[in-house]
Structure formats: structure tokens, C-alpha cells
Amino acid sequence: MTGKIFRVEILAVLWAAAVMISMLMVKPIIGVADNGDFSRIMGQTGLEYISSDRSDRYFGYVNREYKMTHEAAPGRGYFSSEVLLVWLAKLLNCTFTLQKQIFDIRFLSFIYICTLLLSFYLIIKSAKGDAPLLNIAAAAAFIFTFTDIAYISYFNSFYGEAVSFSFLLLSTGWALWLARQQKYPVAALAAFFTAALFFVAAKVQYAPVGLLVAFFGIRLMGLRKDKVWRFSIAFFCALMVVASMTSYLSVPEGIRVCNKYQTVFYGVLKDSPDPRKDLEELGMDPGLAVLAGTNYFMQQYPLDIKDPAFSKEISEKVNPLKIALFYAKHPSRFLRKLQTAAKYGFDIMQGFGNYEKAPGIEYGKTAKSLGLWSNLRLKILPRSLGFVASFYAVYFAVLLIRRKKADTTQLKLFLEILMLIGLIGASQFVVPLIGDGEADLSKHMFLFNVCFDMMLVVSFTGLLNAAAGWLKRFFQAFPGKAKLC
């Protein structure tokens, strides 16, 4: 029994739990203040702010308690799997506090914490090898990275990033666990796809990821030959595609117009050498070139962007495919946008207030000092497109070489899962530019950063294993050296 307690995966989970509980559950709690997006979830789940003071609601402070009402409108507005999690959190709130008027957001945070702890357990248990010291080093790197305040602070919020982060890691954990099995149980397959559904349906931005997961699901077809397995995969893959399409098609018109505005005027036309010509190529009125470089949330504009005719122009003539084709015709322009993404996208701290309002906590106070990893990565990682491209090239080259040499199905699948993480990250390096221009790049590239950090931990672990293997061969070749050491 004692040996089981001291397994690396158990110790890692206990370490992570202690960190998250101390930061997220103890008053004054740490979270991320509302930038105006919370209403998309609160309106569907019957939650309202207690305070009527805007400074208490937005940007500066984290709210721990919310008023529960009977005016929930589920199914209306922003489609997100987060709605289900908030309803579950409300149920826990009412059950354990017997309180039906006030909702404590820590119940939502508790769900995310449990999800992340299960993810840590599955990933570390599935990925560990035969060398105890290497397992400890890899687990420590993983926990250090993903319990950073820049990631877990989202748990005390209604941002979709909390869902995408925790459930991406959970789907990865189930996938890696499945890869280590001999008989590939359907229950593990269902757990993987269920976690992936929550992750993909968290935000419309992740809709393309659903297609990547569906393609990966097709690859799993060959693991078993029976009809139950194949039917299950076909069902879940179809569900992933439906979830992706539903997520995209259900975006409210107001949000859709906002995103398209950002894509064109704060994306394509921002720093454009000829905005009028670009608008003509997009099939839009060249006279709108006066809006080049503006975003949707400014106070003044050269013309009325709230005019119904303008909204109709944006809604009917702009779509992601047209924007993607535009950039395909102007690759140098798109490369400059990607360089901008690399320059500003690595900062995962948003600058909104991170603390609950309390004596001694000033408005807008952030918890950057608690983000050891998020601060370190800003100092050591080159924020350039060249670095991102080079890292991706080396990462995939190593995995492909190892995949070619792999002699078991389990190892091949394990390496393919690591490649899938890279592909998800690559999609989230590109999609924000096509779907929202250069607006809020650091926030919209959150998932890219999660995947990139996972790739960094994988690379770190691989280097440790390579170094250990080299040392072992060295001492075998020169046993006298081993005695001297």
C-alpha cells in the first residue's frame, strides 16, 4: 500500500491539488476578471452579478459569488459545452450549501480541478517509463508547467479557456491510456471522445479541431476488427463533426458580425499597402477603406458601423473560406500576420484583474508574480515565426523518425497522439488570424500555448531519455569511468 502511495503519478496529483486548492479555493480567491464575455454563459445559466457597480463587475476584480435567478435561457445565444458544466456546478452548489440564491464560482473551479487532476494522473501514468528518476523529472516538469497561475486562474471564471485547457488534457490522458492497452476497451474510447467533445465545443474557435479529432478517430478503426468497435468510432467521429458544425453555425449574428469586422478591418486591412484594392478583392465596398486598422470596440469611427446596411455587407460578403483564400493569394501578407502572432501570442496572462475584491487588493491587481513558468517562457522563448516553425519542424521530424522505427502498435499510436497535439496547436496558431484578425491575439492563442507547452514537456522528456541512454552506453563501453563516478 505504501508503495502505491509513493508512485510518481500519485505524488504529482497530490502536489497539483495542493497548489490549485491554495490558489483557487482559499479566500481571497484568484481567477480572471470579466472583460464582458461572461454574459454569454451567465445568460444561459441564470446567473447575475450581485453588485451593480461596473468596477466590481468588469476588468478589475474576480467575483466569487453570483446571484441565481429563474431567468435562464438555455439554448439561446452562445453555444458552448461550458453551459453544461456551469449547470452541474450550480447543482453542486445547491446540494452542498443548501443555498438557492447565491452561486459560489468555486464549485465550477472544483469541477475543473478534478478534471485536471484526473488528466495529470492518466498522462503521467501512461507516459512513464522504466527509469524512476526520469519519470520524476518529467512529472515535475509537467506539473510545474500546467499548474501555472496563467492557466489555472481561468478556473474561477466563465471563460471557455478553462474548459478547453482542462478537457484537452483529459482527452490527451485518455488517448495515451488507450494507447497503452492491449485490448483497447470501448469504455476508454468513449471517455476519450467525451472529453474531446467538451473541449471542441467550448468555443467556436475550436470547431476545426473537431475535424482533426474525427480524422484521428478514423485511424483508430484498425485497432480492432469487431463491429462494436467500428460502430462506436463511426458514431463518435460523426458526433465530433456535428459538434464542430453546430458550434460554428450557432454563433449569434451579433458575435458573427463582430468577428468578421475584426477579421477584415483589424486583420486583412491592418497595415495593408492598398486597403481599397483588398476590399475589392473581397467583393466589398472600397469606400470602407477608411475603417482600415480599426477594431469593433472603439468609441468613434469615420462612418456608422452599426448601420444595418453595413452589418449586412459584412455578414453576407465575409466568411472564413474567403479570408483563407485571400491569404493564400497573398502568402507574404499572411506570413507577416503569423509573425505578429508569434510576437504577441506567447503571453498567456491577459492583464485583467486576478484577485477577489478584499482589503488591501487594489483594482486590476494581477497575479503575475505567481506565474513562474509563464514569466520564464516570456524571457527564454524567442517570439518569432522562425522559432515556432523550427521547433515544429524538429518536433515532427523526431516523432516521424521514431514512428517509422516503432515496432509495436502501442508505441506507434502513442507517437501519433503526440503529433495530434502538435496539429491542434498549429491550427490554433492560424485560426485566430482568419477568424478574428489581430484582435486579442494572446487570448485567442491560448490553446496554441497549451499545445506548445505540451510539446515542450515532451521534448524535455525526450532529451532526458536521450541523455540517459547516452550515459548508459558510455559507461557500458568504459566501465572504468563508471567506477570513477
Image: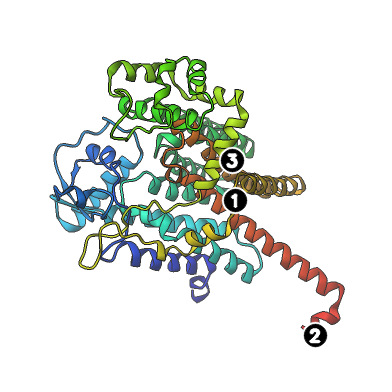
* Mark 2 surroundings: few (<14), some (14-19) or many (≥20) residues within 10 A: few
Instruction: Compute the Cα span from label 2 to label 1.
Output: 42 Å
**Where in the figure is residue 141, as x and y percent of width and height?**
55, 64
* Mark 3 surroundings: few (<14), some (14-19) or many (≥20) residues within 10 A: some
Residue sitting at x 32%, y 56%? 31
Read off the residue under disc 3.
423
Can you see residue 46?
Answer: yes
Q: Looking at the image, is mark 2 or mark 1 nearer the viewer?
A: 2
Residue 65 position by quadrant:
bottom left
Q: Secondary structure at mark 3?
A: helix
Residue 484 badge: 2
User: Which badge, 1 or 3, comes first in the chain's sequence?
Assistant: 1
Residue 334 badge: none
In the rendered view of the protein, which quadrant contains the C terminus? bottom right
Residue sitting at x 20%, y 52%? 56
Residue sitting at x 58%, y 69%? 136
Read off the residue under disc 1.
181
